[in-house]
Amino acid sequence: MSTPTAPLPFLGDDDLARLYACGAEVQARRGEILIREGEMTTALLLVIEGEIAIETDGVAIAHCGPGEVLGEISMLEDAAASATARAEQDARVRRSWPDAYPHAYRA
């Protein structure tokens, strides 16, 4: 699979490739929570396959699919997650950790 294009518009191709290389693919089963509202998020998630529901107070407010990124705001602002991310169906995501590529987040 090739590196996804432009999930974070302020990162260049080299940074995106490094970000992708520093991660690990994770299989998420239907109903599995990937990010929990109110908890600190230490990873950036890139949806490879499947659909992820974004929920607040248990209500779905959005859906994310392949190529979309989750957890970026919490990670960049060092804040608790503002929503829960739950696999709507079996999904594959790429989980990357900021410690592995701090240079990728320089403005």
Image (cartoon, grey):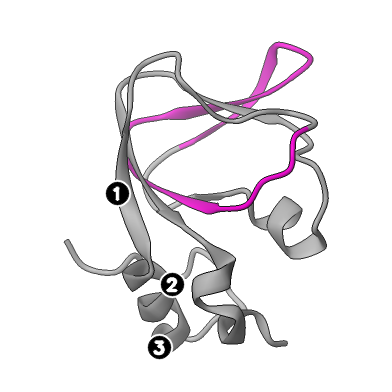
Count of numbered labels shown in the rendering = 3
Lower position in the chain sequence, tag 3 or tag 2 = 3
The magenta segment: 39-64
Q: Is residue 23 left or right of residue 1?
A: right
Residue 14, label in figure? 3
Element under label 1?
strand
Mark 2 crowd level (few <14, some 14–19, many ≥20, 10 Å Cα): many
Is 32 above or below relative to 20?
above
Q: Is residue 14 left or right of residue 34?
A: left
The residue nearer to you, when weighing 75 against 56, is: 75
Residue 19, label in figure? 2
Element under label 3?
helix
Is 23 above or below relative to 32?
below
- Residue at screen point 56% across, 53% down: 43
User: Which amino acid type is marked by label 3?
Assistant: Asp
Q: Identify residue for label 1.
A: 25
